Amino acid sequence: MAQEHGSIEAFPESLELTDDDSVLQIVWNDGHISRHRLDALRAACSCAVCQGHHPSQSLNLKPAQFPGIRITDIAPVGRYAYHIVWSDGHDTGIYTLKMLREMENPA
Ligand SMILES: [Zn+2]
């Protein structure tokens, strides 16, 4: 029922780096807790550089390509997404709240 119109109603109350800064933990205002391994989150980057403008251009990134990746900076984009700057210098990734909420990424 929260999936109507493809949007989510929950909003992050807190973002925290845990597990020796290798996991981004998000506590949502409905009590849900998401935990994202940073290597998997980096590999899931949906920007045009990583995914191309067509599936055939996708870099097909895998978490194993990003051992020890860290978040250099993270900032909200309006009320719908976060802009993440990665320690490998990649800074064009936008992670929507919907993606952060729905990504299956047990850590
Ligand atoms: Zn990217």
Image (tube, rainbow, N blue to C red):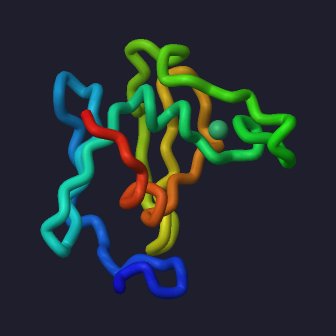
Q: Is 94 located above or below residue 35 in the figure? A: below
Where is 96 relative to 48, above or below? below
For this view, does 4 lie left or right of residue 101?
Answer: right
Q: At x 54% / y 31%, what residue is drawn?
A: 43
Query: Where on the picture, by quarter, is residue 52?
Result: top right
Say which residue appears at 50% left-offset and 61% top-offset: 96
Q: Position of residue 67 (x, y in %)?
A: 43, 13
**What x and y, as percent, mark residue 102?**
40, 58
> Splitting the image into four quadrants, where does ligand 1 fall?
top right
Horizontal and vertical percent position of residue 91: 60, 38
Q: Residue 6 placed where, x, y %? A: 53, 78
Residue 61: quadrant of the picture: top right
Q: Quadrant of the N terminus?
A: bottom left
| Tag count | 0
Apparent side of residue 98 relative to residue 34 in the rendered image (left or right): right
Q: Say which residue appears at 46% left-offset and 65% top-offset.
A: 98
Quadrant of the drawing holding the C terminus: top left
Q: Nearer the viewer, residue 21 or 5?
A: 5
Residue at image x 19%, y 22%? Answer: 20
Q: Between residue 46 and residue 104, name the one nearer to us.
A: 104
Residue 93 appears in which quarter of the rendering? top right
Is residue 27 rendered to the left or right of residue 37? left
Q: Residue furthest left?
A: 31
